[in-house]
Amino acid sequence: MNLDAKVPGGPLEDKWDRHKKDLRLVSPANKRKFDVIIVGSGLAGASAAASLAELGYNVSCFCFQDSPRRAHSIAAQGGINAAKNYQNDGDSSWRLFHDTIKGGDFRAREGNVYRLAQVSANIIDQCVAQGVPFAREYGGLLANRSFGGAQVSRTFYARGQTGQQLLIGAYQALERQIGKGTVTMYSRHEMLELVVVNGRARGIVARDLVTGEMQSFAAHTVVLGTGGYGNAFYLSTNAKGCNVTAAYRAYKKGAGFANPCFTQIHPTCIPVAGDFQSKLTLMSESLRNDGRVWVPKRAGDTRKPADIPEAERDYYLERKYPSYGNLAPRDIASRAAKEACDDGLGVGPGGRGVFLDFSSAIKRLGEDTIRERYGNLFEMYERITDENPYQTPMRIYPAVHYTMGGLWVDYNLMSNLPGLHVIGEANFSDHGANRLGASALMQGLADGYFILPYTIGDYLAGAKLEAVDTSHQAFRDAETEANARLGKLLAIDGTRSVDSFHKELGHILWEKCGMARDRAGLQEALARIPALRAEFWENVKVPGSAETLNQSLEKAGRVADFLEFGELMCSDALIREESCGGHFRTEYQTEDGEALRDDDRFAHAAVWEYQGENQTPVRHIEPLTFEFVKLATRSYK
């Protein structure tokens, strides 16, 4: 497997500018001759589709939702980072880069991350020009707030609706191109196969989810912006439709899958309420700006929070991490909450919760100010829990939120499979082992607006692409394969629902490959998942047919992929014998319970190559070199 990252040499701050000068161009008259398929219409996909169409390419954009407006990016609440230094508090591209590299526990490429920090300022300008209603100070300047893992205020926000407002901006740009006829939008279509011709990605097979029709689409290049795989855990903050299918199909066609064990557990989610819950709700990390996290000092203390005096409260993040306090990074804050609950100090039903308390902030700033900053989040919490967070602390607990692993890409955002570009959460490139808050929106828009439009032209200008259409045998083979898989699922006619398998898989992954992992647990998972998968293919019940709208069939295909992908996650976690970011192996920790990295053995990206059904995939590595930052133990104390 060729894992040439193609990171330019020279000074860190000059890499991207020099690279742009060296990239080949497609002349304006020739751009219209190239067809580009973009799968996914969230922030990464929509911004890429709009930008490439504006440049003159013929773009086809696919999403399984009824509208691009319903992509999961809409759920991002807290904000988007940018090194604008509006607060004059010492921020810079270097500091954003350093925070991100450190936050990811030194498991990301320097070149990619610095580029992300550089273009972050452009994103804000772009979005303001689109009319995104960022919060502003009294004098009219854009406001900023803080997020975990940083000691500066660099997060731009639109109350608790930042993702929604940014997606509206990208969606409007996309709709403009749809109106001009430069983007053909295929909503309610799900990619089920990647088509490879002569070693290059040349198209996809997608199913019309309304009519059931299987269709082929050819292009000169394919872009995946299909998000992450957090729903492998069943319970997560992701939209229920989020899945790994598109990325996993590409993996099966030769694209390397990097660091699949890197999953982010977000510390501020509403706790699980019961066995029949199918979805978790995130409360934005921005709440930790003003909310203080605490638990009672005495185990089993069931008094109302207002009845527990200050002296009997443990503000454990402020105690353990005095430099960052409640703004400790997500992985650290999540583990600290789990430790408190494991020690019997948890609050609420089942003891799986900690308090996020705004009483001090309300006393200091007034309820109107808190309502202005977080009002919609407080309203959402009250609707779900029937508790008023202005009067009693929120109860929060960690939950699966984001995945740092994804398809391997080089500096040009192209996978090892020529012609297949991967952007946003679907790739592995920028966050290392842990994603800092407000960085997902930044990466999605950076990839779509400011990086891919440069690098995709270099590929198209340099590749010798023969004429290929959907009559090619590779498309017919891919359609046959997709239809056969759906037919097999429908023919089983077993007795267990798709959800029951998904729920059992999620339970295994959460218990054995979740916030804490160990060798014995991962080995147990690797024994149980194949057995569960075998039962799935013998006993799943999928009602209906493939010739019409059939959401059970859609779900069955996605869960079938999760059942294979879950094994890949656990295999990756088992081999990585260290703790870093969201990957915490209990055997590898310091005396005071902090993550213990092994840079000598694991300062690399682990990239898995598919070998065929029931064959063990091959693990390759891309060594990570650090020329500009010093590898150091991550400390927020």
Image: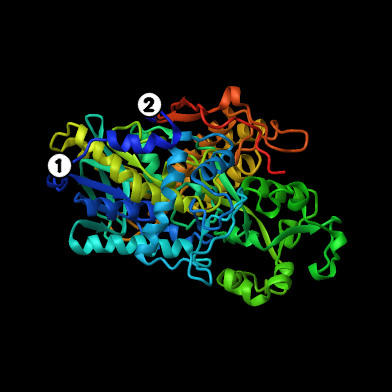
Above-or-below relation of 542 to 388: above
Is 504 rendered above or below residue 293?
Answer: above
98 lies left or right of 611: right
As measured in the structure, the alpha-carbon distance from the residue carrying label 2 to the one carrying label 1 is: 30 Å
Q: What residue type is labelled 2?
A: Asp
The disc at residue 524 is none
Residue at 83% across, 67% down: 303
- Residue matched to label 2: 4
In the image, 105 versus 529, the foreground residue is 105
Q: Which quarter of the rendered picture does the C terminus lie within?
A: top right
**Residue beneath label 1, please?**
469
| Residue 164 horizontal/vertical position (percent) | 44, 64
Q: In which quarter of the image is residue 288?
A: bottom right
> Coloring scheme of the render?
rainbow
Residue 294 position (above or below residue 478): below
Give the image quarter of residue 593: top right
The image quadrant where one finds the N terminus is top left
Q: Which of marks 2 and 1 is nearer the N terminus?
A: 2
- The percent position of residue 332, horizontal first and vertical second, equals 66, 45
Q: From this viewpoint, is residue 480 visible?
A: no
User: Horizontal placement of 48 versus 90: left or right?
Assistant: left
Q: In this rendering, is residue 551 above or below 429?
A: below
Relative placement, left or right, of 89 versus 324 is left
Relative to the observer, which residue lies in front, 262 or 631?
Answer: 631
**Secondary structure type for disc 2:** loop
Residue 159 makes an appearance in the image: yes
Closer to the eye: label 2 or 1: 2
